[in-house]
Image: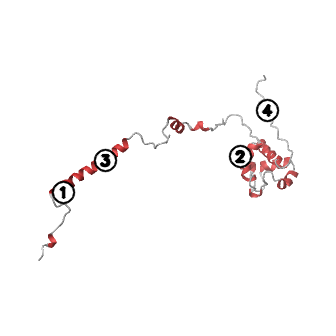
């Protein structure tokens, strides 16, 4: 029988190669760890030309959200009525700018003609209560009737009407309020 099945070959054939393999097995991981520590502890990580860590950029990122132009309104304070144009842009333009659901487009005299013939009061009543596909107050129940009427005047006057903007009635003084 042959002793060939008991023979094993190894890459390491001399004691010098064994020492080199053992040293490499220890040194390669140690050098890798040292390089990682150096990379993590390095202070300058910003690319050339970047101002991401400048004092101004950091201050802009951490300034409060309230300073971004948001206005908070006092829910217990008196309501500030919006103009007809503001209400149109905020609510009405969703349908009246595109003609969605059969609504007359802003400035389309042909589509507004039959509606204008019904009169100011009917237009305002339909806008406040809703008609066909149009929800009451254009879908925004927070609008005051005067704001809706102003939006109607804005849209109707944009199509050739000469409606006068509604006047706001001053709230009546309470009966028990002292006279000044």
Query: What is the x, y in percent for residue 33?
Result: 31, 47
Would you call the spot at circle 4 few (<14 residues within 10 Å), some (14-19), or many (20 or more)? few
Q: Earlier in the sequence, mark 4 or mark 2?
A: 2
- 151 lies left or right of 13: right
Q: CA distance from mark 3 to mark 2?
A: 60 Å
The residue that appears at 78% across and 51% down in the rendered structure is 106
Using the image, tell me which numbered label, if any, was put on residue 90. 2
Give the mark toward the camera: 3 or 1. Answer: 1
Q: CA distance from mark 3 to mark 4?
A: 80 Å
Using the image, tell me which numbered label, if any, was put on residue 17. 1
Query: What is the x, y in percent for residue 20?
Result: 20, 54
- Please give the count of numbered marks on the rendered protein: 4
Residue at disc 1, secondary structure = helix
Query: What is the x, y in percent for residue 103?
Result: 77, 55
> Residue 84 occupies which quadrant of the picture?
top right
User: Could you tell me if the residues under marks 3 and 4 are in contact, i.e. CB atoms within 8 Å?
Assistant: no
């Amino acid at each position: 029988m042959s002793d060939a099945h008991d023979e094993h070959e190894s890459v390491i054939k001399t004691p010098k190669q064994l020492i080199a393999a053992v040293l490499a097995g220890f040194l390669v991981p140690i050098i890798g760890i040292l390089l990682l520590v150096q990379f993590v502890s390095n202070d300058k990580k910003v690319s050339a030309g970047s101002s991401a860590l400048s004092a101004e950029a950091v201050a802009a990122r951490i300034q409060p959200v309230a300073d971004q132009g948001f206005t908070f309104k006092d829910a217990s304070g008196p309501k500030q009525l919006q103009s007809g144009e503001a209400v149109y842009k905020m609510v009405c333009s969703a349908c009246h700018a595109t003609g969605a659901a059969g609504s007359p487009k802003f400035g389309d005299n042909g589509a507004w003609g039959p509606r204008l013939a019904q009169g100011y009061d009917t237009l305002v009543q339909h806008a406040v209560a809703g008609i066909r596909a149009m929800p009451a107050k254009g879908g925004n129940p927070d609008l005051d009737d005067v704001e809706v009427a102003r939006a109607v005047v804005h849209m109707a006057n944009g199509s050739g009407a000469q409606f006068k903007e509604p006047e706001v009635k001053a709230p009546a003084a309470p009966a028990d309020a002292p006279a000044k």
